[in-house]
Each structure stands twice: as C-alpha cells, then as structure tokens.
Image (cartoon, coloured by chain):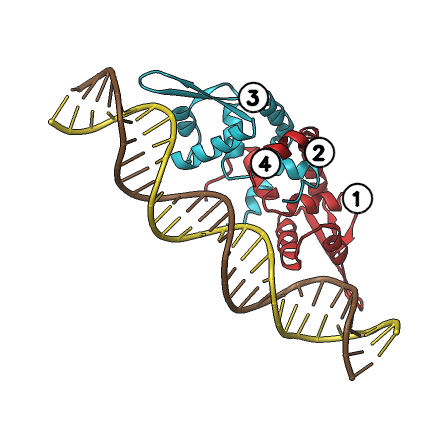
Chain colours: A cyan, B red, C brown, D yellow
Amino acid sequence: MIPYTCGLDAAADVIGGKWKPRILWALHSGPMRFGELRRAIAGVTEKMLIQQLRELESRDIVHREVFHQVPPKVEYSLTDLGRSLNVALAPLDAWGADHLDELEASRAG
Amino acid sequence: MIPYTCGLDAAADVIGGKWKPRILWALHSGPMRFGELRRAIAGVTEKMLIQQLRELESRDIVHREVFHQVPPKVEYSLTDLGRSLNVALAPLDAWGADHLDELEASRAG
DNA sequence: TCAGGTACTAACCGAAAGGTAAGTGAGGAT
DNA sequence: ATCCTCACTTACCTTTCGGTTAGTACCTGA
C-alpha cells in the first residue's frame, strides 16, 4: 500500500464514503443513539450506517458506548480527533453552502 | 435527484473521486499542460486524468484552454471558484498532515 | 523509415461500493 | 398471542468506479 501523498489525501480517505460527512455533521451537536442517527440521516439504511460508523470508530473519529440495558442502548459520539476533523471540515461546508446554487445547477445526474 | 442536504454534502460531491484532490493540489501552483499533470500525479492513467478533469471543468472548477499548435497544447488552470475551493480545502489538508501517523496506523488495507 | 511526443478516445473488465430484504433475540406494550 | 422497538447481522444483487489495452492524427528528430 502506497503511503498518503499529502494531508488532503489522508483526510479524503477518512471521510470517504457516501454517508460519513453526514454522520460527522449529525454528531456535531452531541452524542446520539443508533436509531436517532438513522432517523436524522435521511435515506441511510441500517447496514450502511453501521458500516460507516464502524469505519469511523476504527479510525478513532467516533466513540461507541454500549449501555447494557433493556432495550439495548448504544451511543455514538465524536472523539477529540473527530471534533478536530469537524473543525477542519467547517470551511468546506461553508464553501459548499456559499455556492450551493451553482453546484446544484452543474450537477451531473 | 435529492438536493444537497448541506454545504459539505455539495462539496463532497465536487471533490469526490480518487484523483480530484490531487489535481486541485497540483494546479495550485499555476496552469499546467495535460502531460505535465500526468507526470506530476503519480499513478494516474490518461483516461482517469481526462475523466476527472472534464468533471471539474463541467463544475467550473478548472479551466481548459486549447492552443492550436503543432504539437497540440492544452493548458488546465483553476478558475476563481477552483481557487476558493482550494482555500476551503487547506484546513482539511492541514488536519490530515497533523494526524498523518495515526491515520496511516489505522488504515484498512 | 520509424520511434516518440502531443492530447486524447473507445471498448472492455474486474473490484468495490452501495442497496434490498430478511433474520436475530430480548423485553414491553396492546 | 402478537406486534413493536432496540441494535444489529447476513446473504445477495446491482451499480458505479477505476484500470487495461489499444487506437487516432499530426509533427519532429534520429
């Protein structure tokens, strides 16, 4: 495996995937349960949500905490690394918001 | 097609694809010819480079200028929008660079 | 004469990403 | 008794992405 060629390369690898930016954004306001996340992110399936959460967890971007209760409760939250990533993502979000109209207009589909 | 849900969503759509961040980064220092780009971006094939350049061009991120010469010369450069995108990308690159070691360590492959 | 550089284009293929649908097992509500 | 919620898990299928190979037309230098 070739090493990352630059910081952007590494960052892209971490946030790559259809749902990761949405997850990061949703968790920005605080910890959420699995079901809350599923309802908060329109269109995501359980399989995809778990898959992406596991990947983010393995990268130490999100923290998973299980409460041994009935019914089961699992909370997902941002780690320090995750919070710092969100900070770095903010300008990109602002850029996208600034140019939303042009970007919608030049969309492929 | 569902509209973008946030700025980050839109931005991710624009820079999505294996080679787009690399292209943006390479063009940061100024206009480049097709062949220069191909040599600057290790591992990219002609097909992929053109494909991604065309997508960036259709989004008005890069500008393509043909010089009717022999041999042919085509120069690619960032538009104003492309330059503003690169500015927004800078913090993400810095974040990736800051955490390169941890990110390499937690890599999947 | 023939390889090499210029910037592409097209046909094909395999891998990876993403989506669908169903099942799990415990308990609480109706 | 049956459905519902919780947080998953599994098997399968389709779509997309990226890579390989080859070919185009033109001119230059050896």
Q: Label 2 to label 4, Cα distance in Å? A: 22 Å
**Chain letter belonging to callout 3:** A
Q: Are marks 3 and 4 in contact (CB under 8 Å)?
A: no
Q: In the image, which disc is placed on residue A79? A: 3
The amino acid marked with disc number 1 is Ser
The amino acid marked with disc number 2 is Ala
Identify the mark nearer the N-term, 2 or 4. 2
Which residue bears the numbered disc 1? B29
The amino acid marked with disc number 4 is Arg
Quarter of the view holding residue A94: top right
Q: In the image, which disc is placed on residue B90? A: 2
Q: In the image, which disc is placed on residue B107? A: 4
Element type at marker 4? loop
How many C-alpha atoms fall within 10 Å of the one at disc 4: few (<14), some, or many (≥20)?
A: some
Write the residue at 52% across / 20% down. Answer: A29
Q: Are marks 1 and 2 on the same chain?
A: yes
**Chain letter belonging to callout 1:** B
Q: Position of residue B35 (x, y in %)?
A: 75, 58
**Chain letter belonging to callout 4:** B
Q: Can you see residue A65?
A: yes
The amino acid marked with disc number 3 is Thr
Number of labelled discs?
Answer: 4
Q: Are marks 2 and 4 on the same chain?
A: yes
Identify the mark nearer the N-term, 1 or 4. 1
Q: Are marks 2 and 4 in contact (CB under 8 Å)?
A: no
Q: Label 3 to label 1, Cα distance in Å? A: 35 Å
